[in-house]
Every structure is written in C-alpha cells, then in structure tokens.
Amino acid sequence: MELMSHSSTFLLPTITPSPTYALVVLNQSLPRFAPLLWKHAQLRLCADGGANRVYDDMPLLLPHENAFDVRKRYKPDVIKGDMDSIRKEVLEFYANMGTKIIDESDDQDTTDLHKCVAYICDWAPDLDKSNLCILVAGALGGRFDHEIGNINVLCRFSTIRIILISDDCLIHLLPRTHRHEIHIQPTIEGPHCGLIPIGMPSGSTTTTGLQWDLAETEMKFGGLISTSNIVKGEKITVQSDSDLLWTINIKKL
Ligand SMILES: Nc1ncnc2c1ncn2[C@@H]1O[C@H](COP(=O)(O)OP(=O)(O)OP(=O)(O)O)[C@@H](O)[C@H]1O
Ligand SMILES: Cc1ncc(C[n+]2csc(CCO)c2C)c(N)n1
C-alpha cells in the first residue's frame, strides 16, 4: 500500500519544497493567518459571501496599512457560487479589478465550496493531483449544517487533498487507499487530535505516535471514536480499512 505524507507547512512563513496550493475563502471570519495562506496559494477563490470577508476582514488583519491598498493587493482570482450572499459593492469592486465572476445560481444542490473545489480540479487538469493541496479558510465554527456540508466535500472529493481550516483547528481526510504519515509542526499545531471514521464504521485502524494508539481497533459512531487524543511525537502513522478524518488543534499565538 502506497504511503501518503501530510504536513501543515502552509502555516509556516516559508515552504520548501512547496506543493501547489489553492485557497478557498468561505463566508466566515478570516483566520488570523489568512494573509499567510494567501501568500502560499497560486490560485485564490472566494466562495460567494467569502468575498465579503476578504473585503471586510483583510484590512482588519493588516491594521497598519491603508484599507484600499490592502483590498487591491488581496484580489481573488475567482468568485464562484450561487451569489446570494456577496454584497453588490463587493462584487462590483472585484469585477472592476478583473476577478473572474462565476454565477452558478441555477445549481441549488451543491454548496459554494463544492463549486469552488470543482473549479480548482478543472483549472489544473494536467497537474499531478498528489501535488495539489486545497486550503479552505473559515470552514469550521458557526453553522453546523455548513460545517457538515464542508466535511462532506472532503468525502465527495476524496482523491484530492483538501484541508479545512479555522483559527482553532484543521481537518483533512485520510483515504483508506493509502497508509499515512503525519508530520507534526510542534510550534504551530497539537497536541490535541482526533481520528474519526466518516460515512461508515472502521473495522480496523492501527496508529503509532499517539497517547491512545489504536491497534487493529474498530471505530464507529455509537461506539468508540478517537477524540481528545494527544500527539506524542513528531510523526504519527495511521492505517485503516476505511476513510478517516484527521483533526488537530492549531496553537494560539
Ligand atoms: N457558519 C459557517 N460555518 C462554516 N462554513 C460556512 C459558514 N457560512 C458559510 N460557510 C461556507 O461558505 C460558503 C459560502 O457561504 P455563503 O453564506 O455564501 O453560502 P450560502 O449558500 O449563501 O449559504 P445559505 O444560503 O445556506 O445561508 C458555504 O458554501 C459554506 O461552505
Ligand atoms: C435534499 C436537499 N437539501 C437541501 C438542499 C438545499 N441546498 C443544498 S446546497 C444549496 C446551495 C447553497 O449555496 C442548497 C440551497 C437541496 N438542494 N437538497
């Protein structure tokens, strides 16, 4: 079984070697490290009302700079969604700056995040998808239906690396098709973590590097799931017969 490595290097100021990052900003308060994620990304999208957050919050995160200058510098490449949340003045501002606006109000069956991930996959058809990583800012906290909808996007695009990020934690999927090595960045993440079966029970999961390691252990909702676990070292390994969510806390400043 092939190895898949994971590392939250996008939370560090410089990354070498760097995967191709795309950033999706959702309609939630921007995480404090949004400017850093923006810098790392080669493609920046706003999901509908996410554009309001870039417009309103980026200047607040950079209070020593002129708000207009900040807005010009943090110009999304694409705004995509059903366009029921973006404010008119925000849409006009970015449209005039050359942002591509994609109105998919006809599709009321997929979320704005889903629409953005589909765009990114089409944007780089020839790119080796193992080298693409989609960072989703503002994905957690707030409305539970949105949070679950965002997690469902991880499941619908299970072959794409997608990381849901808030100020407090990150979540990504560990597909059952691979064994996993998670390299912890101890200055920025941990020690609290969780491994959660999603969609179906896991008959057998084995880990190393956790305070409460699993040894061919069954996990299911209604039975055991691994929450409030603790990372012990800088390398965690995971192997499972079903897809799992990995979550770890992001340290406060
Ligand atoms: N409170 C929240 N928590 C988590 N994600 C959110 C939250 N609010 C919005 N999002 C994410 O941002 C995206 C864009 O948000 P927006 O408010 O524009 O969506 P929407 O489709 O208009 O939502 P709705 O019509 O259900 O209020 C959503 O698709 C969702 O992924
Ligand atoms: C069974 C079912 N439940 C909810 C919706 C509503 N919905 C889901 S995604 C979306 C777009 C949000 O931007 C909307 C309105 C639906 N279509 N089908």
Image: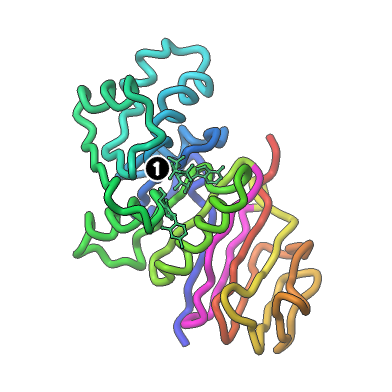
Magenta span includes 176: yes
Near mark 1 (Cα within 10 A), the count class, few <14, some 14-19 or many ≥20, is many
Quarter that holds the C terminus: top right
In which image quadrant can residue 222 be found? bottom right
The answer to whether 113 is drawn above or below residue 47 in the figure is: below
Which residue is rendered at x = 45% and y = 83% of the image?
2
Q: Which residue is mark 1?
A: 40
User: Height in image: 142 above or below 179?
Assistant: above
Foreground: 228 or 127?
228
Secondary structure under the numbered disc 1 in the rendered image: helix
Horizontal side, residue 76 vs residue 59: left or right: left
Position of 29 with respect to 196 (left or right) is: left
Tell me the residue at 42%/36% (across/down).
50
Describe the colour scheme in one phrase. Answer: rainbow
Q: Is residue 120 magenta?
A: no
Q: Position of residue 247 (x, y in %)?
A: 63, 60
Amino acid at pointer 1: His
- Is any part of residue 236 visible from this angle? yes
Percent x, y for residue 8? 54, 54
Q: Residue at x 67, y 83 (%)?
A: 206
Quarter-wise, where is residue 73 in the image?
A: top left
Q: Main secondary structure of the magenta part?
A: strand
Q: Is residue 77 left or right of residue 59?
A: left
Q: Give how far across and how far down residue 55 sits, in percent.
A: 41, 24
**Residue 121 image offset from top left, x and y in percent:** 28, 60
Span of residues in magenta: 168-185
Judging depth in this view, the residue of 118 and 36 nearest the camera is 118
